[in-house]
Amino acid sequence: LDHWLRAPGLVSPEGGGAEHPLSEYAAPPVTGVPVPGPARFRQVPRFDTIDLSSNTNPFLGATGEYPHLDTTELADTYLATIATLPGHEGVAALSADHLLFSSGSVDGVMLLLAALASPGERVCVTPPTFPLYGHFAHLLRLPVVEVPLHGDDLSRLDTERILAADPRVTILCDPNNPVGTRLDPEQVHDLVVRGRGLVVIDEAYVEFSEQPSYARLIAQHDNLIVLRTLSKAWGLAGARCGIALAQPGIIEALRRVQVPFGFTDASQHAVRDRLTDVRRVVAGIQRIRAERDRMAAALTEHPAVARVFPSETNFLFVRLHKHERVMDQLRGAGIVVADTGRVIPDTCRITIGDRRANAALLEALSAAL
Ligand code: PMP
């Protein structure tokens, strides 16, 4: 895996792996007290020792302490939980060292670009797609190659053009935002197997899909990174918890560029709680899917709508007959949808809401006619 780890900051001037700059402050393991996991920063256990190492305030309670850095247990719980979901066969073979928690999955994108791409190396994105991939690549001064999706449902990759561009990193969004469709799985597989670079698959919406997650293939491919989030199906957007899944060498590289302590105690608690409530989450996914299919049917029939793209997400991508007028009408009714008209003319992206919100949307669309 050393092959992937040549970005500046990951290699010391002497050529060996660089230590994390904070590791000189890392507390040594305390004799007699088990320090679990392979955490880079061996944090002093909270109760069995007197911690005079981190310049914190002892007088204002637990919020004065830094968050736990060893998230091994939470990682194991996450993996065990998603392994029970449909389309996640094979995930049970992964362990905590295949996983990194980040501040939302967008942070994961930034980490992997910073850790795994060197100056001048190309990043390939496939528009229309989530715009932050290209944005982060630009911020990091990495050249961006855009290879648009095609096909009637915008689910086809131009694999030959992507391979010809020989990118260091290709970032795919599957299911894709803003279109809502899944990419052709054979083409995705082709890129992973034939490309020389890393393939990142952002699966922010995969829990809403009928097709399996690519997480099951992590153990077989050292160039595959799957990004997940708890912001969508898991209902924890405010907790800022993203998850990168990849082989351990990659995960370690991402960990080294990460700002420490980003995964706060409050977030860790929220995540732990939600993972114990998987039945509620699954019920929510089923409700959203049912509501999505109902809304897709209603919108397909709607005279204001020219086309509803098939969706495997919690949103619908819609082409409108009178785009400007409909957008004005929705704004006037206090309904906010994503206006994607600048990306693909006459389109908008509608999140599936609760029954009341969805009914209000349909009503406002009718009023626009
Ligand atoms: N990836 C995609 C494809 C998204 O649509 C979004 C949210 N809009 C994100 C990532 C961001 O997720 P997070 O909240 O985990 O940063």
Image (cartoon, helix red, strand yellow):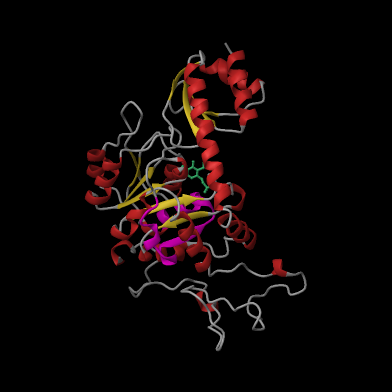
Residue at x 59% of width, y 49% of height: 236
Along the line of sight, the residue nearer the viewer: 358 or 14:
358
Pick the quarter of the image with the N terminus: bottom left
> Given the current orientation, which residue lies at the most extreme right position?
59
Residue 271 in the image: x percent, y percent?
58, 57
What secondary structure do most residues of the magenta stretch adopt? helix
Residue 4 point in image, percent of width and height? 32, 61
Instruction: Look at 55% across and 77% down and name the residue there.
Output: 25
Bounds of the magenta segment: 88-114
Name the one closer to the observer, 69 or 316: 316
Q: Please, is residue 347 above or below residue 275 in the view?
A: above
Residue 265 is situated, as x and y percent measured from the top left of the image, at 63, 63
Q: Position of residue 344 (x, y in %)?
A: 43, 25
Q: Residue furthest bottom?
A: 31
Determine whether 175 is above or below 291 in the image: below
**Vertical placement of residue 338 versus 275, above or below:** above
How many discs appear?
0
Residue 6 covered by magenta stretch: no
Q: In the rendered image, which quarter contains the C terminus?
A: top right
Residue 9 in sight: no
6 to the left or right of 243: left
Name of the residue lying farthest toward the top: 369
Residue beneath the point at 44% across and 61% down: 99
Please determine whether, in this image, residue 246 is positioned above or below residue 171.
Answer: below
- Specify whether residue 283 is in view: yes
Name the side, left or right, on which 132 lies relative to 287: left
Q: Is residue 101 found inside the magenta-colored segment of the image?
A: yes
Drawn side of residue 164 relative to residue 232, left or right: left
Q: Quadrant of residue 327?
A: top right
